[in-house]
Amino acid sequence: MNPTEPNSADLNAIATDIIPDRDTPPQPPQTLGNFLDRLYGTLFLPQVTFEQLKANPSFVQAAIVIALVNILETFRLDQFVSYRIIWSVISGIIGWLFFTFLLKQLANVFQKNVEMDKLLTLTGFASLPWLFMAPALSLPPRLRFLAAISVMIWFIIWQIWSASVALEIKIWKTLAIVPLAIFGGIVTLIWLGNTLKLILSISL
């Protein structure tokens, strides 16, 4: 008895199962929910990771990133005193909160309302490029300046890119918002610092 030959419908079904659809876009890694994967993805897979961070925000993880960046920055400045490290972390988190709050308020100009935890998560993880400032400054003098400038540009681009993803607006529009938020955050921190100094000088 001869075996039954498969018909064209069966062959098409087998081919569909074996050969992937070329029109289907590649799926993002499913392990980006892991904190270490998010760190790696922010640096080297920003577009996929920013979208994933927006879909699954984590204020705690973003705060850890900000704390880590400020701790390493304190070590870079050879300030190993515990109170300096604690103050660096506190001031860094306060500056991050002010920056993100001002960014959210400025986004209202474009009638964009985004959840604060999403914006905090994206801007927090977008601070990771600053980790490379210390290695950049440890290079020989001829390369040190260019490397430091490159890290600063990388940091600014990631902040603008992450804000653009969070607010769902064009990058060129974000270019007008982020510098204003940074400037406003710096002014606020200076004002806060001067106020604290005044209070301490009065109380002492």
Image (tube, rainbow, N blue to C red):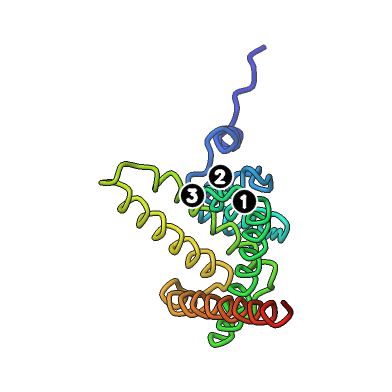
Q: Amino acid at mark 2?
A: Tyr
Query: Which quarter of the rendering shows the C terminus?
Result: bottom right
Q: Residues within 10 Å of mark 2 (few under 14, many from 20)?
A: some
Report which residue position mark 3 lands on. Answer: 23
Q: Is residue 15 above or below residue 60?
A: above
Residue type, mark 3 in image: Asp
**Label 1 is placed on what type of residue?**
Leu
Mark 3 neighbour density, 10 Å: few (under 14) some (14–19) many (20 or more)? few
Q: Is residue 50 above or below residue 175?
A: above
| The N terminus sits in image quarter | top right
Residue 6 is tagged as: none
Q: Earlier in the sequence, mark 2 or mark 3?
A: 3
User: Quick one: 23 or 146, which is closer to the camera?
Assistant: 146
* Mark 1 or mark 3, earlier in chain: 3
Q: Measuring 53% from the left and 53% from the top, which residue is drawn there?
A: 73
| Side of 59 where 95 appears, left or right | left
Q: Secondary structure at mark 2?
A: helix
Q: Which residue is the extreme one toward the front?
A: 204
Q: Which residue is identified by label 1?
A: 68
Please name the residue that numbered disc 2 is placed on: 40
Q: Residue furthest top?
A: 1
Q: Nearer the viewer, mark 1 or mark 2?
A: 1
Where residue 74 sits: x, y (%)?
Answer: 56, 52
**Cα–Cα span, label 2 and label 3:** 28 Å
Using the numbered discs, state the Cα–Cα distance from disc 1 to disc 3 in whole angstroms: 41 Å
Residue 50 falls in image quadrant: bottom right
Residue at (41, 75) in percent of width and height: 172
Circle 1: element type: helix
